Each structure stands twice: as C-alpha cells, then as structure tokens.
Amino acid sequence: MNATVTSMPSHSTSRRAPGPSADVLVIGGGVIGLCCALELQRVGRQVRILEKNTIGSGASHGNCGTITPSHAEPLAMPGVIAKGLRWTFQPDAPLYIAPRFDPALWRWLWNFARRCNEADCRSATQAKSALLQASRLLLETCVREQALDCEFETGGLLYAYRDPRQRDADLHDLHYLREVGIVAEPLDAARMAAEEPSLREEIIGGLLFPNDASLRPDRYVAGLERLARAEGVEIIEHCEVTGFRRERGLVVGVDTNRGPQRGREVLLAGGAWSPLLARQLDLRLPIQPGKGYSITFDAQRHPPRHQLVLRERSVCVTAWSSGFRLGSTMEFSGYDSTLNRTRLEALVRGAGEYLREPPTGPRVEEWYGWRPMTYDDLPILGRAPGSDNLWIASGHGMLGVSMSLATGRLLADLICAREPLIDPSPYSAQRFVF
Ligand SMILES: Cc1cc2nc3c(=O)[nH]c(=O)nc-3n(C[C@H](O)[C@H](O)[C@H](O)COP(=O)(O)OP(=O)(O)OC[C@H]3O[C@@H](n4cnc5c(N)ncnc54)[C@H](O)[C@@H]3O)c2cc1C
C-alpha cells in the first residue's frame, strides 16, 4: 500500500511543564523510541524517554545508515534455507548461527523456515514496502524542513556482482519489488565501470536502486534527540527499566534503577532487548538479537560515488564526507557481547575483493549491534495483546533507520486514535500466538 505522506508539523499543538507522571513513557532511546517520542510530543502528549545507557547507544549507533525501500523483500524467501545451510560451514560467511541449546531460537528458525514460500514472501514485501516508502518520504521532508544535519544523500544504492549466478538470482527476484513499485536498473560491466570507477575490473555487473538514500546514523540520532528536546520530550539516560507496575489490569508505570516512573501509556521500544522486558508481562515476542558488525575509518581519498552492497559477501559500504564504513554480517549467538574477529575481518577481506582501493588508515571504531529480528521480518507495531495502554514498537530487524519516521507517525496515530498513516494490521502483535 502506498501512503500519502505530508510533512510533520514543526510545532507542538500544546506544551506542558513536565509533571510527576508522563502521558507516555517510552522505554528505549534508539531511533525508534526517539521517532515515536517526537511525533507523540508534537501532537500534544507529554513524553518521557527512559534509556538504560545513553541515547542512540544501541543498534542505532554504528549501523550502515542506508535508507532502503529496495530491501522490501523479507529475509525469508524461497531458496534461502539451502543458502543458509551452505553458509553454516563457513566461519566468515554473512550468516552464522552459533550452535547451542536455545528453544526460543529454534522456534524462531522453524517459523522462519515455514515462511520461505512465494505467498508469505509477497505479503511481507507489501507490508515492508508500505512502511519503507512512507518513511523515505518523511525523511526527505524532515531533513529539509528541520535542517537535520546527518549527511543525508539521495544518490541511490548500487549492488556490485562478481558472480553471474548471484546477479541472475537477484534479477529473477526483482518481480516482488516491481509489484510494489520499486524501481531497479540493471547495469552491465561497462556501465558499472563508468558509473562506479572505485570498483575492480572483475565486477560483472550491477543493480542500481535510484530511490534509495543514506545518512550518517549517529548524526541522525543526534538530530532527532535535538528535535525531541526542543519539542519538550524529557529524556532520562542511565535509567534502566527493570519491571512493570500494574493496577486493575492496566500498566500504570515501570520500575527503574532510579526509582518508579508513572505514565498513562507505556511504549516498549527497547530494540533487541524488548523480548526480555516483555517476558515479565507473559508476552513472548519472537525477537532474536541478530548481531551485525561495522568498522569505521576516516573519510577516504577516493571514495565510491554510490553507497554499495558487495553482493556475494553481503558487505555494505557507506562513504560520508566525515567517514567511511564497512558493515553487515548476521550472527545468531544470543546476547553474546564479544567482537568476533573472524567475522569483523571478513568485512575488510570482502571489501578487498571488490574495491580498487580498500579502506586505509586507522580504524576509528570497531562495533557490533543487535538487530531486533522477527522471523517474518516485519516490525511489531501497536497495542500489546491483553493490554489497553501498553504499546510495542520493536522488531525492525535490518531496517530500523529506514523505517523510523513512519514508525513514529504510525504509533502516534494509533495511540492518539487518529487516522493511521498506513494500514497497521500487518504489523500487529496479534499475528503471533501468545
Ligand atoms: C551492522 C548493522 C547494520 C545496519 N544497517 C542498517 C542500515 O543500513 N539501514 C537501516 O535502516 N538499518 C540498519 N540496521 C538496523 C538498525 O540499526 C536497527 O533496526 C535499529 O537501530 C533499531 O532501532 P531500535 O531503536 O529499535 O533499537 P536500538 O537502537 O537498539 O535501541 C533500543 C534502546 O533501548 C534501550 N533499552 C533496552 N532495554 C532497556 C531497558 N530495560 N530500560 C531502558 N532502556 C533500554 C537500549 O539501551 C537501546 O538504546 C543495521 C544494524 C546493524 C547491527
């Protein structure tokens, strides 16, 4: 479904002094919590964000910053299981599942496998696309109207191929994207060489998604935080939510390491940590932490002209005027917080196979983040089952930045009982059996 999107109002309709109790408590200060808080505050709610570390310190920090309506297809596609099994035996493959006893992960994988069929792939593509395209429009308007300084670029995303079989498979799957109006332009080797001189001569072709964009995610988060504070959102950092307070069947607040907080509505936007908190309310959110890595360098002398996906290695290359980042990989190893060097170095090795000048100079940051992965690759947005005033905005997987502004708008629409920006039903938590 394509959304008609108008820009956000630049001033809140009402502004009140913070009281002892907020209208809405938002748990988690990543891109999702921030966008929801900002939109709710703008329509007159008094919002308070509770963040256990600092704003934007989770997955929203070191990700690749690509804004990709082109990624509307879900991970669960026909043929993906065979590919995943091949990768299991490669320690530096783009996908890794740490072998261990974890019934929740096995259930997740089983449900994922069941969705690797045409019909589910098509309906997930439609639902993801509605959110991605609405968000892409909102982002462009927001950057322009709010002077958001986040190195936003609209030059498109370019896939680079070394293997004709991978290119042919992607070209075959393009029909899912065409059905939702996403444009892709295949490029042969000669066009690729002209379009992107940073690539090596072995590149056999490419695929250009001209409507994709990019930004620097930490600057985007900083810009959202600035807008939120200016609108009057209260932000409490180093405030970890440890439990929920309930009265007569309603969630009336939360317990934190800094004392209790009361709110008329509570919104769970804790990214990959959301299922850990939800469990306390007997909600089993099927979200697994999908660990990804990135390495950031200083800006390079001859950066690529486009944001790139080095397709067979699934490495994403983003070049900003302030830096250069290699990122990606997907690791299901629970909440394991170690940096796996083999997988981190796979990013650099992958880049060397495609780029004439792989990045040089000191590494400014080596980073991992946990993507909040649902098995159907759709976020969970809306009212929590069995509760009138607990809301969920989690499970954005690989695309939380790309979906952030439309998520904020949709949650505000639902909480304030307004006409929703897009049809919310595909994202409802009710789709899971609790
Ligand atoms: C390597 C990598 C590359 C990526 N590239 C892209 C990309 O190019 N484009 C894109 O769109 N997306 C990308 N993503 C995905 C994107 O980063 C995530 O989908 C998005 O950041 C999720 O945002 P979030 O706000 O839900 O979660 P987070 O940013 O993780 O925020 C959740 C917040 O909740 C806080 N929290 C958790 N528990 C509690 C608690 N009990 N009390 C208080 N606070 C709590 C955490 O501290 C955290 O700050 C990438 C991810 C990775 C790992």
Image (cartoon, helix red, strand yellow):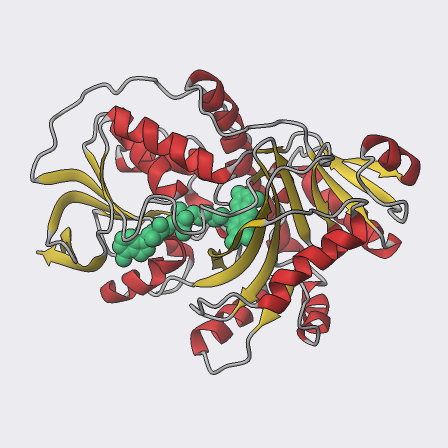
Which residue is pictured at 81% across the width and 45% down the height?
Answer: 356
**Quadrant of res 77:** bottom right
Q: Is residue 302 above or below residue 286?
A: above
Residue 410 percent location from the top left of the image: 38, 35
Nearer to us in this view, 155 or 176? 155
Give the left or right position of residue 76, taking residue 23 as reference: right
**Quadrant of res 79:** bottom right
Residue 313 percent location from the top left of the image: 72, 57
Quick check: can you spot residue 95? yes
Q: Is residue 75 above or below residue 391?
A: below
**Quadrant of res 349:** bottom right
Give the left or right position of residue 175, taking residue 417 as reference: right
Nearer to us in this view, 316 or 371? 316
Which residue is pictured at 62% across the width and 37% down the height?
Answer: 299
Q: Is residue 34 above or below residue 314?
A: above
Give the left or right position of residue 231, taking residue 82 as reference: left
Quick check: can you spot residue 423? no
Nearer to us in this view, 250 or 169? 169
Q: Is residue 259 above or below residue 265?
A: below
Which residue is pictured at 37% across the width and 55% down the height?
Answer: 430
Q: Quadrant of the C terminus?
A: bottom left
Residue 419 percent location from the top left of the image: 35, 28
